[in-house]
Amino acid sequence: MAGSSYDALVIGAGHNGLACAAILAKAGQKTLILEANETAGGLAGTREFTAGFSAPMAHSAAALPKTMIDELKLSSYGLEVGPALETVGLSEDGQHVHVIGDTVTGATDADAAAYPEYRAKLQRYAKVLKPIWEATLPRIGASSLKEALIYAQGALKMRMLGKEDMSEFLRILTLPMRDLVDEVFEDPKLQAVLSWDGLIGSKMAPRSPNNAVLPMLLRLGGVHGGDHMVPKGGMGAITKALLAAAQKQGVEVRFGAPIKKVIVEGSEAGQKATGVELVNGEIISAPKVISSADPKTTFFDLVGAPAFDVQFASRIKRLRAQGYVARFNAALSGLPDVPGLDGLSGRYIIAPSFDAIEFAFDDAKYGDASQHPVMEVTFPSVHDASLAPEGKHVLSAHVMYAPHDERSDWSHDARIRFTKAIGDALERHMPGIGSLIIQAELLTPKDIAADYHVAGGHWHHGEMALDQMLMMRPTYHAAQYSTPLQGLYLCGAGTHPGGGITGLPGRNAARQILR
Amino acid sequence: MTTKPSMKAFTEQVTELPPGLSPVDNYAGERLMTSPFHERQAALNLRDSWEAWNGYKFANHYYDVEYEYICIRNLCGTYDITPMQKYLIEGPDAEAMLNRMVTRDVNKLKVGRVTYCCWCTDEGRMIDDGTIFKLDEGRYMLTSGSPSNAWLRMAAFGFENVTYVDKTDDIGALSFQGPMTCEVLKKMGFEGIDTLKPFGIMHFPFAGDTIMISRTGFTGDLGYELWITADKGLELWDALYEAGADYGIQPYGEAATSMARLEAGFILPYVEFAESLKTVHFKHDQTPFELGLGWLVDFKKPHFSGRAALLEEKKRGPGYVLTKIEIEGNKPAEESHLYRDKACRKEIGWVTSAMWSPVVKSNIALAMIQPKYLSGDIWAEISYKKEMKPRWKIAKCTVVDKPFYTPARAKATPPPKF
């Protein structure tokens, strides 16, 4: 369109928006990123929650694939992959369970002996899925031979597992986490720890049927084969490197530029997205508008349901995208001394058993916050001293389950109750931590939705469930990054391969757009 | 209002009940509702020939199908369309919402006018057809053959200022069709009704209420549809039948309607088309292009639900097209297969509706035919019975472009006097 000075507008400077913009710009597209907040990163960014103290929203990364780091040359922009973090199942009596690499300590000998084989098996399966995870999955019924080969490649890899292993792969794909884990392991804390990564971020507990294993296998595709890591200099280094990579390619980034709506122009030739109108009234035109926002926000808030066909809008409306993870950030006057732990650079799970998670979920299933929440705790300031004033520290916890639902109105009282429950659990497992807390912040999914412009406050922009995954993410006719609205594209976690810090949705979107 | 079936007869029979039990109609929810005109219609239904439509009891025929048909074509008759679904759609976004839902451009519809329309799935398959009445700015009535609540709810999502209310049970509606209808309405005192143009709407005071009269119908002839508050139904009936007594007024049912509509070239659900949302098999439903309703699809609108799919369909061309044909002889080609050759080797389509038309004096039918064979020979394989003995014949068919029956009075304003 006349007067358009950009080839592409990317909505949101989250890690997927940055990855998408960087690749577009590299291909010569004049690209502008519009970010509502004042900093980049989105849910992968860093948040100053009280004066002098900041916490990364995602406090560790499991799924960041080496292919992304290499493709965007993130190493040359300062990203240095950190060592694998140990995951620790905390025990009130100091008898913790430690998991790192192939090693399990603190559980039974049988558990420790079984773990390497279990891990190797899952990694084999993750490799089978890798071509499918990383590629753009062709639209059903409309794929070329070349595109269909992506499925064939996956099928071939699966066949190459051998008959028995392939059958086993198919058997476990849709198991509940509990069934996957308790078949092999007996220690309750270890069981809880090993089920954790299949559940967190989703509306799921160990007994929830299907869907848990498949998304977990995605995370196994990361640099440490499933173990989490924090890059050198902290999680902020990922966003910094992506932003630098994008800017180096010529991407322009505007912060504090919230969008009022995507402009849709209609004529006898149909309708198409032709740009955006900012909240301040400014209009920016471009033939391609690429949203890293979640599908509901994109289709309903930024464009409006009436621009889409009735059944398509209805499918988007029906997407399950209610967040169940709250965020608890605390400014600490110092690090706690946790009995049985040597240093606090790991990832600490407070969930003593499957049932502890399941019971916490039961409350949330009916719309209430868990009375006895379970959580994953890290101390980001251990990895990145700049997050807190000298000598002081930051605690970051992902807490389950905190429903976004209408029933949980998150009144002042409800917030106090939930905060107290978190404090109690922390104090029991890290005695004395209460007295170290200077200031704390609770972000319910509702707060996350408001602060990060994510409908439902869902980590992954939508449940990672079979009906919302792969060539169906977020739903058919929008699952290949293009949408039914000409000129409008998706590049966020609401598209394949989905949530987690991978950058793959952003990269795949850019590739589709450039095709 | 609808009257619930009487419990009296049942309770009188049950003299001794187990203690603690009261007489209960186990089928209460299954019984058919009756329309505001039922009392009079039941008295005239000499054959007790009832069917069900959207949960209402309505007549297949009253006395004799052919007699009712002759009344439609030569005198006047009433057909109870109360069971047709009626929705009041209101609000500043009503027009935009309807425009997104239906394939036609609702912007072009003026206040006091009615338009025929259809709506489709995202895949461009037809869900239903109906009419939109523009009652006022931001105020519409939508009618449809089958309940559309669920679709309306989905179609209204995203529009903040629109409401839709199902008025089916609140409005009694009579289709009043035939050459004498205007005379009868004039006699009832609806002054100026003869100035009402086809697809126009007028309102008149009636029985302390307001009656809405639209010049619409399903017979292809002169006719009107009368819309009244349900509890004024009997008053309307009595006034109409009093005024119509000298004009041969007669109630007619579904069977006579089906004859008249075929002559007019109108389609029926589950005869010509399968409602897409209720169709199980892939593509056993139809697109508007297949049904010859391409003229309802307005691609000048930048968007409506199903637009992209219909544009594809238009480019590709439909696989079958609903076609009007005349068939030699006088044996109705009901359920006939159609062939390119007299030897019946190459099948090219099938008949959806067929009849001997008394008014056209021709053997007519609607048929789905592959468009590429429309220009060549078309043969129908007709099965029929003679004195119960099954027979068959091969008859030549001719494609007809215009509706079979189009009397000038259907479009004349004012209509001719009698």
Image (cartoon, coloured by chain):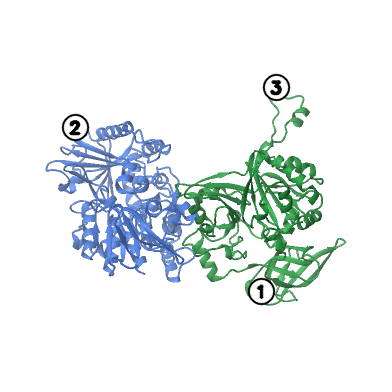
Chain colours: A blue, B green
In the rendered structure, the residue with mark 2 lies on which chain?
A
Residue sitting nearer the eye, A25 or A269: A269
Q: Where is residue A159 in the image (x, y as percent from the top left)?
A: 44, 63
Determine whether the residue tagged by mark 1 lies in a helix, strand or loop. Answer: loop
Residue beneath label 2, please? A435
Residue neighbourhood size for the residue with mark 1, other residues' Cα within 10 Å, grouped as few (<14), some (14–19), many (≥20): some
Label at residue A473: none
Q: Where is residue A275 in the image (x, y as percent from the top left)?
A: 34, 61
From the viewer's perspective, is B396 left or right of B228?
Answer: right
Amino acid type for the residue under numbered disc 3: Pro
Label at residue B19: 3
Residue beneath label 1, please? B374
Q: Residue furthest left?
A: A390
Q: Residue furthest front?
A: B191
In the rendered structure, the residue with mark 3 lies on which chain?
B
Q: Which residue is drawn at 27% across and 63% down?
A: A22
Determine whether the residue tagged by mark 3 lies in a helix, strand or loop. Answer: loop
Give the alpha-carbon distance from disc 2 to disc 3, as whole Å. Answer: 71 Å
Q: Where is residue A358 in the image (x, y as percent from the top left)?
A: 39, 38
